[in-house]
Amino acid sequence: MPRVMAALSTGLAVGAFSIVVPVAIWPGEAKLTAPLFCSATEPMVVSDTFHDSEGTSTNYTLYCVGDHGILTNEGFALPMAVMLTAHVLIVTALVLLATAFRTKAEPARDQPDGMQDAIEH
């Protein structure tokens, strides 16, 4: 159980940090969530940059483009939540696999003399 909790906490920490990927590096990752939000349409991620007195900000929005160019605004909050969940699950699974392989690769520890005698008899 401690191994699962450690993997989950690592997954949460790295997953939360990895949310930088869809926001700053590859906003198009939101397209991967399109099958959950768009039905038989083409996904499109649009960035809108705004300039105001507080500075510059950029918003990303997932749109589903249907037949005849009909747009459905799916926002970015739900796709972002799905991506965060996927990142956490992937990292947690990788940590669990890594610790499982590491545990199998470790040699068996020597037992105290009294324990070894009890095991042999």
Image: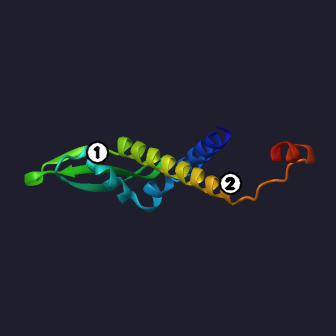
Task: Say how many tags the image has.
Answer: 2
Tag 2's secondary structure?
Answer: helix
Q: Badge 2 is on which residue? A: 103
Report whether 113 appears left or right of 45: right
Q: Quadrant of residue 46?
A: bottom left
Tag 1's secondary structure?
Answer: helix
**Residue occupying the far top of the picture:** 1
Q: Badge 1 is on which residue? A: 36
Residue density around tag 2, few if under 14, some if 14–19, many if 20 or more, within 10 Å: few
Where residue 12 sits in the image (x, y, percent)? 57, 44
Residue depicted at x 83% and y 44%:
121
Say whether residue 53 is visible.
Answer: no
Say whether residue 115 is visible.
Answer: yes
Report whether 112 appears left or right of 48: right
**Whether residue 114 is situated above or below residue 99 in the rendered picture:** above
Report whether 36 appears left or right of 27: left
Where residue 117 sits in the image (x, y, percent)? 88, 46
Where residue 51 sits in the image (x, y, percent)? 40, 53
Residue density around tag 1, few if under 14, some if 14–19, many if 20 or more, within 10 Å: few
Q: CA distance from mark 2 to mark 1?
A: 37 Å
Report whether 121 appears left or right of 95: right
Where residue 82 sits in the image (x, y, percent)? 40, 44
